[in-house]
Image (spheres, grey):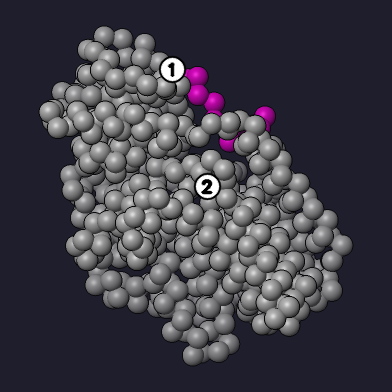
Amino acid sequence: MFEAGLIFSTFVLCFFIRLSPFPAQGCDAYYFLLCAERFKKDKQIPIILPNYYMLENNEQWYPPGFSIFLALFSQKFLEKCHWLLSPLLDSIIGLILMFVLYALTGDVAAAVIAGLIYAFAWGAISQTENMTSRQLGVLFLNLAVILLFISLETFPFIAFYFIAVLLLLTTHKLNSQNFYITLPLLAIISDMRILALYIAGLVIVLIATKGFYWKILKAHWDIVKFWSSNWPFLGAHQIKHSPVYGNPDDYNNEIYSPANIIKYVASIILANPLFIIVAISFFTLNSLGSSAIDSYRVWLLLTYALLFMLIVFPFLRGIGEGYKYVAGAVPATAFIAGYLFHAGHYRGIILMLFVVSLFWSFFKYYKIFQNQRVPPAGGRPRMQGAINYINELKTSDNISLLCVPLHLSDIIAYNCRIKILWGSHNHPFEMIKSIFPVFKKKISELKKEYGINYLLLDKKYADSGFFEKELKQEVFSEGDYSIYRI
């Protein structure tokens, strides 16, 4: 009971670390809430949304796993408490790895050390601010990988591996990409049986989804192609770096700036510094005593090789920004570090790197609290007045709305149920290219092409002066938000 109490206390600590006094509700959350609501009503896959998003098909080809998961909860709970789910799910990952490590070693100290490493890893904490499918993706990725390695030793586990692969590939794109890329590489350098199980997993998913997985892949490939062409402007200001409103040459993506590359790499390492001890162990310890854990360690190193490759070769960023792969690597890092601690290896270095992780997380939280004295931009509390006005306006006018910045679109689509000039969740991804990542067409052109008649503008993001004579009348203004008739 004492051991269980220690592990559970670490889980509770992990959860509270991830809670913010100003929870940012985020744009992704509202898309998932829409899909969950629709799935609960229709009980069908693919999910078909009403015609809210003008720049994508209504039939959703985004992996539906997280939306199905959300549909298990009541609508009332989701509306009020959905921001709790990402911190809770991420903390459950830490709880699982602690129990598995304790069951494997019988060493509660090692299990708690692993839990604390996970609890304070900024690479995991930073991904829990908004409700997304990422935490389930991280869980299913790590389960799929470790179950694959166990299946090579104990064949009956293969059924659990196939279930984990099905859940992963129908839940989260980026963690699926990790699976797609690292497993074949691992097969080539270690054991070709991995490739056979990898291919079998893909076939099982295709069969189990009755072919819908093929549509998920097609939509996924659309996104990869889009960002392979547009990666130089990922992170650009949609208006200031626009060729029609601003100056694209002003954009200097600090991620790929030679002056800042060291700072960026350092921030990635500090987001999960215990990775260093895993790398050291690879070169100094031939085996950790288990072929499954040895393979898990190699997979972790391949994940880091992938994310650093995306930094060195930015033209590959169609498969994602390097730092986004860190979250998927944190569970393996914490587990292996805890296992090394149990075996008596590098205990001093492990504790030293944990302290580094601890101070880095405290520093990042300090910076957030310093800059976030009020709820974050785009969060519902600050724009409730705009939401109320749009809901009142739609009773007397047929509204088609453009939001600047575009991340406000999902918030409005969910809360107002009107047509929004946005997409990006679904096939065909190319439909958003006229407005994202920067505006390539003026609002006046978009009005002619799509019939939009209102603009919701966050004035902290862009001044109305950018749009000169395209705006007819300001019909609403409160705080940072204004609504204009176009």
Quarter that holds the N terminus = bottom right
Q: Which residue is mark 1?
A: 247
Q: What element does badge 1 sit on? A: loop
User: Going 27% across and 15% down the picture, which residue do you hit?
Assistant: 474
80 magenta-colored: no
458 relative to 67, above or below: above
Residue with the most extreme right position: 348
User: Is 99 left, or right, of 433 in this rendering?
Assistant: right
Q: How many marks?
A: 2
Q: Which residue is mark 2?
A: 129
Q: Position of residue 241 (x, y in %)?
A: 43, 22
Q: In which quarter of the view is residue 104 placed?
A: bottom right
- Mark 1 vs mark 2, foreground winner is 2
Q: Position of residue 29 (x, y in %)?
A: 39, 48
- Amino acid of disc 2: Glu
Magenta stretch: give its range.
248-260
249 magenta-colored: yes
- Amino acid of disc 1: Asn
Numbered tag placed on residue 306 in the rendering: none
Regarding residue 230, the answer to whether it shows in the image is no
46 relative to 224, above or below: below
Question: Alpha carbon of mark 1 to alpha carbon of mark 2: how far?
Answer: 32 Å
Nearer to me, 331 or 192: 331
User: Going 61% across and 69% down the picture, which residue do you hit?
Assistant: 95
Crowding at label 2, few (<14), some or many (≥20) Cα neighbours within 10 Å? many
74 relative to 240, above or below: below
